[in-house]
Amino acid sequence: MTRATGPLPDAGRRPRDEMRPPQLRRRRRRKQAIFRWIVVALVMLFFAIPMVALLDFSTRLRNGTRNWVSWQPIVHLGSDDPASVEIRAGLVNSLWLVLVTVLIMLVLLVPTMTWVRLRVPALRRPMEFISLLPLTIPAVVLVVGLAPIYRIISNALSISSIWLCFVYVILVLPFAYRALDAGLDGIDVKTLSEAARSLGSSWTTVLWRIVLPNIRSAVLSACFISMALVFGEFTVASLLGRKNLQTAIFIVGQGDAKTAAALALIVLAFAVVLLFVLSFFATGRRRQNQG
Amino acid sequence: MTAELVAPAPTGSGGGRLSRRNLAALLPTLPFFVFVAVFLLLPTIIVVVGAFQDRYGGFTVHNLTILTTGSVRSAAWWSLSLSALSAISGGVIGGLLAYALATAKISGGLRRVVVAACSVLAQFGGVMLAFAFIATIGRTGMVTALIRSWFGTTIDTTWLYDFKGLVLVYSYFQIPLMVIVFLPALDGIREQWREATETLGGTTWVYWRRVAGPILAPAFISSLLLLFANAFSAYATAAALISQSNPLLATQIRGALTNEVTADTTNTAHVLALLMVIIVSLVMTGYAVLQRRASRWLG
């Protein structure tokens, strides 16, 4: 039908033909809007139900009434309740792990990436390839190879969970690399550093006072994504027999599923805030670059 | 090992003095490459070598015979079909959601919120997700309880801890991942292409069949491959949901690692890990190739 009216350049019908597409488009727009809201609503419902269920599950008693007893071990984190002790240990480990992982990640990546850009551009591709490699090596595979290495670490250093930071740097590497790479792409590292060098600053000054402040938002987003990943890490910690927040949730869940549900909800809410901030950061930055 | 990595750099520089300067320039990159060599490349090498080693360290291919055992074969089948099914369900539903978002205004509130939510949820695997679904449709879950109070029937909830349950739970992080990886491709579609189709007399069907479909196909399939690899490498969710048995390759590694101390003589964990790495690398290579193909039109 459209085919018949479409390509005829008849003078009398021309205005009407030009009227058609906007009309059609408006109708399509309306249809698309309805489709959009239905799809978004259904999928969002699917996303929301398990979260609501966590809250419901953690407060509902078998006879149908509600209370917050299961939240007690979390609210009174300092108590002697076995669940509290477990959670506290896991939380402290995870906080330290986040801190140390982020520090090692920044110290390893920022100077090296800057240096490679400035002085050894031939290494950029290999470095990118290696940094993205962990995406193709599942964490559970890495654990198999890491087991003997961590046996050595246990003997040489200690069996403390803090040494997980080394693996965690590898796990966050692809994401942190991408964030920092985008940040460095956004500034002219070469000109900036040459200007600073010609004014007599050392490499440390260039890094600390020129590069770092300029890629602040990239550094922040690399930190946020690393934090989120480390807080959510279970595979390596549990298979290497170490303790962190996720293994604590798992262990608490074996005894008291309700407290574990409450804890999962809190950690999730925290992760949502963290990553929401990150995603708005990222879109804001991208728009700035485009504009 | 580090020397190997650093080696490609000085190529092209001929003179001795120049390459010595280049070597000095390489020095600051050493910490990074040493770190990666110890904690990424060495473990990978240990896996590959270990798969072909007997208990005394000698070379053997005997280990590979475990691939023919019933439990490994069924685990491989479960892993592959779970990854494929959750990739397809995530791909189709996530693809629809991404298309719905692509028709919205780019700076609109709806789109920003949904995309932000997806970037959060795509990371939301593991123990917490398993608990969330147990709280939803487990024996005393919210939906189970609602169905009981509304319809008076008690539904069977054991399927959650079975294959069907895994597909459902995995879809939870596959759908948002699909939105994130597929939305940029849909944004690359230009309104003018549709107008051009209409001007030439094409219907919506013709537009999808002959224009948008072929352009989007590589991006869509490459997204599916990424989802497949994502599901295939996942461990924590399945491990937390099904702790009594090891139905997937990833959880079989858990079993092999815990048995290692006692009686394992065939480096089972290494062989399984090698199998996983090979499959994931193949899939990811396909992903990269198709991604390049997709960027031809949707750059």
Image (tube, coloured by chain):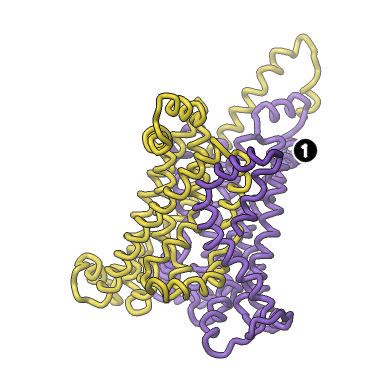
In the rendered view, does B186 fall on the left or right side of A56? right
Judged from this view, the residue extending furthest toward the bottom is B263
Q: Position of residue A86 (x, y in %)?
A: 29, 73
Q: Which chain is yellow?
A: A
Residue A258 falls in which quadrant of the image? bottom left
**Residue carrying label 1:** B210
Q: Secondary structure at mark 1?
A: helix
* Depth check, front residue: A268 or B17: B17
Q: Is residue B18 above or below residue A79?
A: above
* Depth check, front residue: B120 or A244: A244
Residue A210 falls in which quadrant of the image? top left
Q: Chain of mark 1?
A: B
Q: Which of the image's four quarters has the N terminus of chain B?
A: bottom right
* Depth check, front residue: B10 or B183: B10
Judged from this view, the residue extending furthest toward the top is A11
Judged from this view, the residue extending furthest toward the front is B17
Q: Position of residue B48 (x, y in %)?
A: 65, 70
Residue B69 falls in which quadrant of the image? bottom right
Q: In the image, what residue occupies the spot 40% across and 56% down?
A: A101
* Depth check, front residue: A256 or A288: A288
Q: Position of residue A262 (x, y in %)?
A: 31, 66
Q: In the image, what residue occupies the spot 40% across and 66% down?
A: A163
The three-letter amino acid code for the residue at tag 1 is: Arg
Q: Which of the image's four quarters has the C terminus of chain B?
A: top right
Q: Is residue A94 above or below residue B244?
A: above
Residue B192 visible here: yes
Q: Position of residue A49 (x, y in %)?
A: 42, 59
Q: Is residue A50 above or below residue A60?
A: above
In the rendered view, does B183 fall on the left or right side of A62? right
Q: Colour of chain B?
A: purple
Within 10 Å of the Cα at label 1, are there few (<14), some (14-19), or many (20+) other Cα atoms? few
